[in-house]
Amino acid sequence: MGSDSTFTAQKRTSTVLPTTAAAKGGVRGRANLLLPRGRQIHKTFNNIKITILCGLVTILVLRGTIGLGNLVSTDADTENQLLIEETNRILAEIRSDRDPTDPDDQSEELFNPNVTYSLGPKISSWDKDRRAWLRKNPEFPNYVNKKPRILLVTGSPPNPCDNAIGDHYLLKGVKNKIDYCRIHGIEFVYNMAHLDMEMAGYWAKLPLIRRLMLSHPEVEWIWWMDSDALFTDMTFEIPLSKYNNFNLVIHGYPDLLFDQKSWIALNTGSFLFRNCQWSLDLLDAWAPMGPKGSIREEAGKILTANLKGRPAFEADDQSALIYLLISKKDEWMSKVFVENSFYLHGYWAGLVDRYEEMIEKYHPGLGDERWPFVTHFVGCKPCGSYGDYPVERCLKSMERAFNFADNQVLKLYGFRHRGLVSPNLKRIRNETVTPLVNVDQFDIRHSLHDSSV
Amino acid sequence: MLDRFLGPRRARQIQRLLRNGKLTLFCLLLTVIVLRGNLGAGKFGTPEKDLDEIRETFSYIRKRTEPRRVLEEATAAQGQQKSSSSTDGTENGSNNYAEFDIRKILKDEDDGTEEFKRDPSLPYSLGPKISDWDQQRAEWLKMNPNFPNFIAPKKPRVLLVTGSSPKPCENPVGDHYLLKSIKNKIDYCRLHGIEIFYNMALLDAEMAGFWAKLPLIRKLLLSHPEVEFLWWMDSDAMFTDMAFEVPWERYKDHNFVMHGWNEMIYDQKNWIGLNTGSFLLRNCQWSLDILDTWAPMGPKGKVREEAGKLLTRELKDRPVFEADDQSAMVYILGTQKDKWGDKVYLESAYYLHGYWGILVDRYEEMIENYHPGLGDHRWPLVTHFVGCKPCGKFGDYPVERCLKQMDRAFNFGDNQILQMYGFTHKTLASRRVKRTRNETSNPLEVRDELGLLHPAFKAVKVSSS
């Protein structure tokens, strides 16, 4: 190494010095065998010099490799380090799917494919039973203030997302749904439990919807919404009177469904089920492709073979429903309303860049391509590790959609975001001593109520 | 030359010394140059960096002597510092969420000018003084019969208010616990017919941190005249008794309900004699007045610091830190009992706020001996994780205890919701659920144990359908 040679070089040079010095006055020195005191001190000084020199060089080299900071380590530093390590260990434990206290965790019995899966024991008289219950319980009517009772259902897995940012957007999604539900008097259920381990993943909504329907006969419509769908029109209300003769309302395009048999003809990220026997039957007919394992794999192959454009992967609920409705068209389609006059589900890519244009030209309450009701971030998957789209585009768009909707909520309070990607607010109205004038003008609930009267 | 001043021998010695010195310096210089050449000046080599590091180390030691109990708020400045020092791992177009720094996206898009600004020369106020709020509100309620302030006889319309920061938590699992906490509140409120407002916006930059609730509460009271009671709840508080209904009748002559003890406030002025993490405030003129009285200690900066010193002096056992809303309320009640005391109800019969430290280890015992609906020490209504700060990096308690206990409290409450549908968590620490009863073909015959599916407090007035 280079430094070594300098070391030795120095040593050699330093050793040269005393000897040359000694050589000069050497005669006298060699004459005396015992070195005089002066010489000894001189030698000592030289040694000290060499020591200091070597010490300096060592420090320089060490600094080069370790850095100065660590040479001055304090108790605080080590305490910090321990704390960080401990926190990371705990976070890793929390994130892992394994359950340390569960004895059956390792031995998860997979569903036996020989037995037909069912969501529950067959119920055949649900309409009659439900009507009887409603008659017996008039304090829990299915119509409140002349509007049918709706239950909005959404959910996410019980464990933390793979990345912290995923949980943050789940939280923002929940706030967005809470706001819409408060303004429109809709009840909200957020599910974080796997009710049925066989129907895990996107199929988890089926057992959940069935369970909620049966436990809440007072609910007229169950509205499932994905956790990655955001409300972007806070004023728009679903025109439920349009669906008096239908039991399933889902966004899609009939020509894509029947002519092209496309796997994205409908979207099961946002749909409404009436609480009735027909819905229970449809759920039972929908479920068989769901059970995890070989059934789902095989079903996936069938779906890929029969639906246009579907990539090869295990069966998902959307493709299964499309396949069911296509193949049993006469049995089911009479009660299914394929809605596309407003964005019950709005694919995000074509919408998020146009928000500024919408703010300029249109107004909330339209629900369609001019001011979308729902912006659905299909494919972004912020709770996982990888999405189908670049992360920056997804997150920026989700932030924009969230703030676009939040502006509509904050309008009542006299605030607005400083831009669609900004978490900060600015006032749009002065504080006043007669705030009720603003309430009458800006509260969405009052404008809705006036229009319905 | 030297010969003239000193003896010849002396001169030679000094010459030798000088020569040695010259050679030494020369070798030193060579060494430094060679080392710089090998290791480079960039990362560790520059003397300026050295000086910076030394300065930093010493200033860090100096900073450490300040009390750790300071309740800090995450500021944007801290965020910027961090993002500049962390390496930027994503190229444009990466699909991986692990490396992304959200602070790249969040930015203001206007020029920052305030169109409606408070006059900074005047003392701080939450807004222009309103003196006839009771009359204004009564008139409005008369004109809007479809938005009554009582949704059932003896049941007022309640708005539960909570909130968190619009930016992601510093702690990677913080947002997950915020999510669980809001789910817990959503469940309780759905059962009890209470509306929720989740705030994620800072309405007034001067009242940041724990004071942010004051402008928010005032704004909500004035914008929602149909709300009779506003229930503020911290984001780190969880409902653990889903069946307990707040005894609204008890408070018909009071306007402000907090958990606390009269002796600890009025006699001792103890700073933890009450808790402002969970309280009820009636929508009326009195509340606007007390908010105006409460606010002056809040504005960030010198005002808050000075107020903090006053509060530490005046209140019992209060440590040294800037003014917080809880201590300020203790001080107000302690010094102005005659003005406010008769309308303030310090509730201690049930846990409107329950300090987690004494509750979380007893959950199994509670399950064995008691049942939901009690709301007190036997089955607490609220378990409040004071000091845990799951959204920040460091709290006052060990991380493991805090997070594990929050999981247990969440499951304890969630079990009461799941039992409606025939499920329960496998254990209080487990995320997995198991059935408690089989599916049946007669679902309407089954009654849930606690009667929470169709509880009396959610019933609609029969005549109004």
Image (tube, helix red, strand yellow):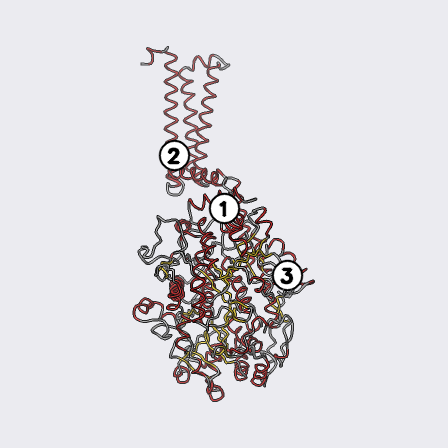
Q: CA distance from mark 3 to mark 1?
A: 32 Å
Q: Which kind of residue does numbered mark 1 sit on? A: Val
Q: What percent of the width, then of the height, locates residue A263? A: 43, 78
Position of the C terminus of chain A by quadrant:
bottom left
Number of dots carrying numbers: 3
Q: CA distance from mark 2 to mark 3?
A: 71 Å
Q: Is residue A158 left or right of residue B145?
A: right
Q: Which kind of residue does numbered mark 3 sit on? A: Trp
Of all residues shown, which one is farthest toward the right?
A: B369
Q: Which mark is residue B93?
A: none
Please state which of residues A171 and B218 is positioned toward the viewer in this rendering: B218
Of all residues shown, which one is farthest toward the bottom?
A: A330
Residue A251 visible, this orientation: yes
Q: Which kind of residue does numbered mark 2 sit on? A: Val
Q: Which residue is mark 2?
A: B32
Disc 1 chain ID: B
**Label 3: how many Cα within 10 Å (few below 14, some 14–19, many 20+):** many
Determine the residue positioned at 49% across, 68% down.
B149
Image quadrant in which you'd find residue B14: top left
Q: Which residue is mark 3?
A: B379
Q: Are marks 2 and 3 on the same chain?
A: yes
Q: What percent of the width, then of the height, locates residue A134? A: 57, 81
* In front: label 1 or label 2: 1
Q: Earlier in the sequence, mark 1 or mark 2?
A: 2
Q: Which mark is residue B70?
A: 1
Q: Earlier in the sequence, mark 3 or mark 1?
A: 1
Q: Are marks 3 and 1 on the same chain?
A: yes
